[in-house]
């Protein structure tokens, strides 16, 4: 067997796979190459002779499965939507993926956003650097204290919209601060939320109550633009919105308008409708917004996590051992393997 790996992959995962197959690793972060053209990917697979393919962003659609005798697919994502599940399952090809691989990383940056917004860290830093914030007298000091002193997380109410892997990690990090945590997630039972030490509630109640509203749910038909003009109007003028999940959870125009008019205090955004983030993006012109270029899940630790998860399941599959993260378990019924 031979594996072609275009995803970022840690050396420990590579070594584990090398004990079972030949490995060719071409990290897309180094090559700058993402295969959006199926014909290019097919040519690459044929050229390497790979029957195991591990990707992160490459598109592996029907055409690839038709042209290449793939035996195993690994996808270093929590949502392997770039892989044709139907085409893989028709051919009995397992798709291994990495749910929650970046939960800690995204939770960390979310908490960083919360602290920065609560204490005006980014705002005061930028204004001091560009000369907009000067302290030359006692009156200036008092003005800075009053305007930028902010508040402690322990005195605040944080609303988490979505309580999956990331939402739970954020809640874990918030608990030592003593914050009140409200959660809206219709797919998690109320008893589960209460057992976790958070308060369940409706989206409207959360928006009306929270000092920080943080989004942690996938984009679906139901969640698309779930935070629009009407929902933002429910938020307190002193509240902030954080989005490290998917940009299309919010109506960007409605959010931009609310921030320009100071109808909410601020926002921290790691995701945008148009990426990569361009220098003329209107959010970058606002002093009350923290912008980052989709960095939430980009730590070096995430690479290690996803590598261990994917390599582990591939080895378990080859050794006919119980699997942990297979996206198309229906193929196991045919093969007689057990999860």
Image: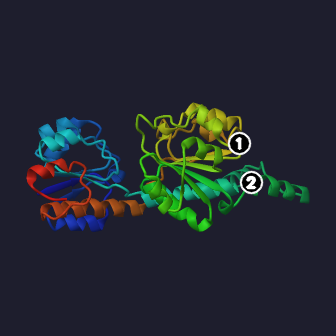
**Residue 63 image-quadrant placement:** top left
Q: Which residue is mark 1?
A: 237
- Could you say which is closer to the camera, residue 229 or residue 267? 229
Residue density around tag 1, few if under 14, some if 14–19, many if 20 or more, within 10 Å: some
Residue 266 visible within the image: yes
Q: Answer left or right for 17 relative to 182.
A: left
Q: At x 49% / y 39%, what residue is drawn? A: 249
What is the x, y in percent for residue 33?
32, 45
Quadrant of image for the N terminus: bottom left
Q: At x 22% / y 38%, what residue is drawn? A: 61
Q: Answer left or right for 314 relative to 192.
A: left
**Residue 228 image-quadrant placement:** top right
- The first of marks 1 and 2 along the sequence is 2
What is the x, y in percent for residue 121?
67, 57
What is the x, y in percent for residue 221?
41, 34
Image color mode:
rainbow
Q: Answer left or right for 158 relative to 24.
A: right
Q: Which residue is mark 2?
A: 128
Quadrant of image for the C terminus: bottom left
Residue 290 visible within the image: no
Residue density around tag 2, few if under 14, some if 14–19, many if 20 or more, within 10 Å: few
Q: Secondary structure at mark 2?
A: helix
266, above or below 280, in the image: below
Q: Secondary structure at mark 1?
A: loop
Q: At x 12% / y 38%, what residue is drawn? A: 67
Q: At x 53% / y 58%, what residue is drawn? A: 198
- Mark 1–mark 2 distance (CA, rounded to whole Å): 25 Å
What is the x, y in percent for residue 225?
50, 34
Hey, which residue is sitting farthest right in the picture? Answer: 138
- Could you say which is closer to the camera, residue 136 or residue 273? 273
Q: Answer left or right for 93 relative to 136.
A: left
């Amino acid at each position: 067997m031979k594996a072609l790996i275009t995803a970022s992959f840690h050396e420990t995962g590579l070594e584990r796979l090398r004990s079972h197959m030949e490995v060719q690793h071409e990290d897309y972060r180094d090559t700058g190459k993402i295969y959006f053209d199926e014909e290019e990917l097919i040519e690459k697979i044929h050229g390497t002779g790979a029957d195991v393919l591990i990707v992160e962003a490459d598109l592996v659609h029907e055409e690839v499965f038709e042209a290449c005798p793939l035996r195993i697919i690994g996808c270093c994502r929590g949502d392997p939507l770039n892989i044709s599940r139907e085409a893989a399952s028709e051919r009995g090809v397992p798709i291994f993926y990495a749910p929650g691989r970046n939960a800690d990383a995204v939770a960390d940056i979310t908490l960083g956003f919360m602290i920065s917004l609560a204490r005006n860290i980014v705002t005061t830093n930028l204004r001091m650097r560009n000369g907009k914030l000067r302290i030359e007298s006692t009156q200036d000091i008092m003005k800075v204290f009053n305007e930028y002193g902010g508040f402690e997380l322990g005195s605040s109410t944080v609303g988490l919209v979505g309580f999956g892997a990331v939402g739970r990690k954020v809640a874990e990090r918030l608990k030592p601060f003593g914050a009140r945590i409200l959660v809206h997630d219709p797919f998690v039972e109320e008893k589960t939320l209460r057992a976790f030490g958070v308060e369940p509630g409706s989206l409207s109640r959360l928006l009306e109550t929270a000092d920080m509203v943080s989004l942690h749910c996938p984009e679906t038909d139901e969640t698309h633009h779930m935070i629009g003009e009407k929902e933002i109007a429910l938020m307190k003028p002193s509240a902030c919105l954080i989005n490290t999940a998917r940009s299309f959870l919010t109506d960007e125009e409605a959010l931009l308008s609310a921030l320009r008019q100071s109808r909410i205090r601020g926002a921290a955004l790691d995701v945008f409708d148009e990426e990569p983030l361009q220098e003329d993006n209107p959010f970058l012109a606002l002093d009350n917004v923290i912008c980052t270029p989709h960095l939430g899940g980009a730590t070096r630790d995430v690479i290690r996590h996803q590598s261990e998860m994917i390599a582990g399941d591939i080895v378990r599959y080859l050794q006919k051992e119980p699997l942990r993260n297979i996206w198309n378990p229906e193929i196991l019924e045919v093969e007689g393997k057990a999860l």
